[in-house]
Amino acid sequence: MGAREAGLPERVPVDGLPPRVTIWEVGPRDGLQNESAVVPVEVKLEFLDRLAGAGLTTLEATSFVHPKWVPQLADAEQLLAGLDRREGVRYPVLVPNERGLDRALNAGVGHIAIFASATETFAQRNLNSTLDEQFAMFEPVVTRARAEGLEVRGYLSMCFGDPWEGVVPAEQVVRAGKRLLDFGCSQLSLGDTIGVATTGQVAKLIETFGKSEVDVSALAVHFHDTYGQALANTEAALRAGVSTVDASAGGLGGCPYAESATGNLATEDLVWLLEGLGIDHGVDLGALVETSVWMAGQLGRPSPSRVVNALAG
Ligand code: HMG
Ligand code: MG
C-alpha cells in the first residue's frame, strides 16, 4: 500500500478531550539540530514546503543561536531568505539572546521562541548560564520582541527529569515557567527533554500550574520519546486540557546538549492518535508520511516512527 492510500483509524470521540489540537511541528528545528549530517539549505526548504503542503500550520523553522553551538542550523539567514512563506502558516524560530533577536528581526520573522531550563545544570550546559542568568538574558529579548510586535513562545526544558539532577520537582518547574509567562510569553511549552516522564507526572505538573493560576490554555507539551512514553503522555496532557502539542515529522530530533535525548514524538504517531480520538488536526497523513520517507532518504537512515513504518509503501 502506498502512503497516499494510507488507512486511518476509526474515529471514536471521547468525552473530556479538546475538539481540535494545534500541532507545533519542530522537525526542521529540533529534528535537524541533532543530525550529525549538515542538511543542505535547499533540502530544508523543500522539507518545510512539504510539511506545509501536508497541512501543518506551525513550522518551527530554525534557530538564531550561536552557529558554533549548533552548526546544523548555522544557515538560518539563508533559510529565511529562501523561505516561500505560505498563507496561514507561521514559521517561529528559536532565539536565545538579544544578538539572536537582532538576527531574527533582520530576517523578518514574526514569531520567536525563547528556551529556558528548569534546572541549574541544563542552563549551564545549554546556555552557558546559571538559572538566574538565563532569565536575565531572556527578559529583554521578550520585552523587545513584544515591542516589535512579535509573538513569543517560552520553552522550558527538563520539566520532568534531568540527566544530572534526577527528578525535577513540579514546584520548581512552575516557578521557572511562571517567570517566562510573566515576561510576556503567550505560550509555555513544557519540555520532557530526555523523555522520562510518565502519565501521572504529566497530569500532576499541569494541575500544579493550574493551582498556581496559570491558564492551561497557555500551556503546550513537548515530549521526546526516549522511553516510549510520548504518546501516552500526550493523551494525559489532552485530558488535562492542553491543546497544543509539539511533534517532529518522522520522529526526527533530540538535543545536542542532552545526550540522553532522542527524537521527539513523531507527528505521524500523534496524528494517528488524534484522528482515532475524533480530534481535528488538519493534517493529510499520507502526504506527511511521504515527506518523512523522503526526508529519511535525505538523511540516509530510516524514520523511527511506528506509523511511518506501518504506512510507508
Ligand atoms: P556564549 O558562548 O556564552 O555567548 O553562548 P556569549 O554571549 O559569551 O558571546 C560569545 C560570542 O558569540 C560573541 O561574539 C557573540 O556576539 C556571539 P564575539 O563578540 O566573541 O565575536 N553570539 C552569537 N552569535 C550569533 N548568534 C547568537 C549569538 N549569541 C552570542 N545568538 C549562547 C551563549 C546562549 C549564545 C549559546 O549557549 C547558545 O547559542 N546556545 C544554544 C544551544 C541550543 O541551541 N540548544 C538547542 C536548543 S534547546 C532544545 O533543543 C530544547 C527544546 O527542544 C525543548 C526541550 O526539548 O526541552 C527547545
Ligand atoms: Mg526538544
Image: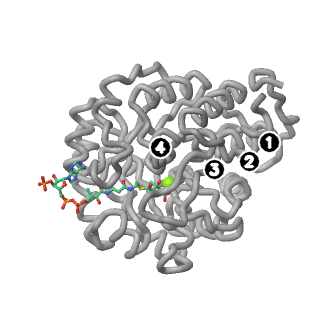
In percent of width and height, residue 53 lies at 57, 21
Separation of residues labelled 1 and 3 (CA atoms): 17 Å
Separation of residues labelled 1 and 2 (CA atoms): 8 Å
Q: List the residue tagged with mark 1.
A: 277
Q: Which numbered disc covers residue 17?
A: 2
What is the secondary structure assignment of the residue under circle 1?
A: loop
Q: Is residue 190 visible?
A: yes
Label 4 environment density (alpha carbons within 10 Å; few <14, some 14–19, many ≥20): many
Q: List the residue tagged with mark 3.
A: 265
The reply to whether callout 1 and callout 2 are in contact (CB within 8 Å) is yes
In the image shown, does 311 or 206 lie closer to the viewer? Answer: 311
Q: Is residue 79 left or right of residue 37?
A: left
Q: Is residue 211 left or right of residue 202?
A: left
Label 2 environment density (alpha carbons within 10 Å; few <14, some 14–19, many ≥20): many
Mark nearer the viewer, 2 or 4: 4
Q: List the residue tagged with mark 4.
A: 32
User: Disc 2 or 4, which lies upstream in sequence?
Assistant: 2
The reply to whether callout 1 and callout 3 are in contact (CB within 8 Å) is no
Query: Residue at coordinates 41% horizontally, 19% vertically from top-left?
Result: 84
What is the secondary structure assignment of the residue under circle 4?
A: helix
In the image shown, does 5 or 280 lie closer to the viewer? Answer: 5
User: Disc 3 or 4, which lies upstream in sequence?
Assistant: 4
Query: Residue at coordinates 70% horizontally, 69% vertically from top-left?
Result: 200
The reply to whether callout 3 and callout 2 are in contact (CB within 8 Å) is no
The amino acid sitting under disc 2 is Leu
The amino acid sitting under disc 4 is Leu
Q: Is residue 181 left or right of residue 221?
A: left
User: Disc 4 or 1, which lies upstream in sequence?
Assistant: 4
Task: Find the residue positioned furthest to the front.
Answer: 300
